[in-house]
Image (cartoon, rainbow, N blue to C red):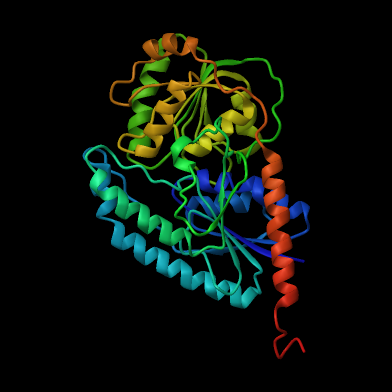
């Protein structure tokens, strides 16, 4: 039985939720799966898979600005992040040694690799985009990102490698990366779409780090309450140790089947343009209005790309106007529910498990095993 450790990043919940289909596939193959993360990400996975062994990794604790430059705010925290990466690497080496781990699957945790076992890195950012005015940093950032990815045996990209992918240049194959690149298709926590009667005109999902999450909620809630639309709000305040608190037409947090049902009952979804959210909405074939986190270049690029593709309308947070967004969004198609390329994930997992099996067969026996 292959022993697998799955370790998603704890910046928000997207990295954890998109690991759910990976874990399900591994369990279907009778793998012995363990979890490793921190904060809400680890709590969410423990709730989703209560029977799995779980370990705590060092947390990154990123701080986002309420105003000012996102780049400089993140740059000022680089020493803290570097320490977290080193600490999580030491912890992973310890867990591998103590638990005889055969395979580590890391979702954007750069320190979760080891020369002692097969290590896989999941990311949708082979290419990290910088804001205008910071082009002089691009080559250096690309080199650092490339060197960190090359610590891993394989890099899995949660998208398709064709011209109709969701993430565009973010997932374009950097030919300089020496690590093997494999596209594994869209990763969504949701199951197959079910047809449901539309109950709400719009469902608002507020997610992401503070203080921007609260700023977005304040901007949108006031407008949606005055709009006359049938609406429901998911506030994005996870307290995974107790049932979600409902109040009228809002709830603090939803996940899994409850969240899928709510989205299926909505005509539109207003949300951040995070890539995990985009994959979830693509899975369900929904229409959306996106509001990217200010200064988060990745979300701004994805929102703009989906607008250019006429899939979803987007608007900046500072100038958001619901009435305008509602009118403009009428000419956008929404996500077309088609192939999510799930066969790519199946193939990738089959290949990596075969690789682990061959590596195990060729591994010299320890003195205790002889």
**Image height check: is 327 above or below 231?**
above
Which residue is depicted at the point 32% across and 40% down? 211
In the picture, measured across the screen, residue 221 lies left or right of residue 355, that is left
Which residue is depicted at the point 34% across and 16% down? 321
The answer, for residue 110, to whether it is visible in the render is yes
Q: Looking at the picture, how far across and down is residue 192, in whole percent?
A: 71, 31
Q: Looking at the picture, how far across and down is residue 180, in whole percent?
A: 56, 56
Q: Looking at the picture, how far across and down is residue 114, in whole percent?
A: 54, 70
Which residue is depicted at the point 60% across and 77% down? 97
Q: Looking at the picture, how far across and down is residue 293, in whole percent?
A: 36, 34
* Residue closest to the eye, 337 or 99: 337
If the image is split into quadrants, where does the N terminus sit? bottom right
**Image height check: is 75 above or below 247?**
below
The answer, for residue 59, to whether it is visible in the render is no
If the image is split into quadrants, where does the C terminus sit? bottom right
* Residue closest to the eye, 17 or 132: 132
**Image height check: is 231 above or below 257?**
above
Q: Quadrant of residue 352?
A: bottom right
Q: Quadrant of residue 337?
A: top right
């Amino acid at each position: 039985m292959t022993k697998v450790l799955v370790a998603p990043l704890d910046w928000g919940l997207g990295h954890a939720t998109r690991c759910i289909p990976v874990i399900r596939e591994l369990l279907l193959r009778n793998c012995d799966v363990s979890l490793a993360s921190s904060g809400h990400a680890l709590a969410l996975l423990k709730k989703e898979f209560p029977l799995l062994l779980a370990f705590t990794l060092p947390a990154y604790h990123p701080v986002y600005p309420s105003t000012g430059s996102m780049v400089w705010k993140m740059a000022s925290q680089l020493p803290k992040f570097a320490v977290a990466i080193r600490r999580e690497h030491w912890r992973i080496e310890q867990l591998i040694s103590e638990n005889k781990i055969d395979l580590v699957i890391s979702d954007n945790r750069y320190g979760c690799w080891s020369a002692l076992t097969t290590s896989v890195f999941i990311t949708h950012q082979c290419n990290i985009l910088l804001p205008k005015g910071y082009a002089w940093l691009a080559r250096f950032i690309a080199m650092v990102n490339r060197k960190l990815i090359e610590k891993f045996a394989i890099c899995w990209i949660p998208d398709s490698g064709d011209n109709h992918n969701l993430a565009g240049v973010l997932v374009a194959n950097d030919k300089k990366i020496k690590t093997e690149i494999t596209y594994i298709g869209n990763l969504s926590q949701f199951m197959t779409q079910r047809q449901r009667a539309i109950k709400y005109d719009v469902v608002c999902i507020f997610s992401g780090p503070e203080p921007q999450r609260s700023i977005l909620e304040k901007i949108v809630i006031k407008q949606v309450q005055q709009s006359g639309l049938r609406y429901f709000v998911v506030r994005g305040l996870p307290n995974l140790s107790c049932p979600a608190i409902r109040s009228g037409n809002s709830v603090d947090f939803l996940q899994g089947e409850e969240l899928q049902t709510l989205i299926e009952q909505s005509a539109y979804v207003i949300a951040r343009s995070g890539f995990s959210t985009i994959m979830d909405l693509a899975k369900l074939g929904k229409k959306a209005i996106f509001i990217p986190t200010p200064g988060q270049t990745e979300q701004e690029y994805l929102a703009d790309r989906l607008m250019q593709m006429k899939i979803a309308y987007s608007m900046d947070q500072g100038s958001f106007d619901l009435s305008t967004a509602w009118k403009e969004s009428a000419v956008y198609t929404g996500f077309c529910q088609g192939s999510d390329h799930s066969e790519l994930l199946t193939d990738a997992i089959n290949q990596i498990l075969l690789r682990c099996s061959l590596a195990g067969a060729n591994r010299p026996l320890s003195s205790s095993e002889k």
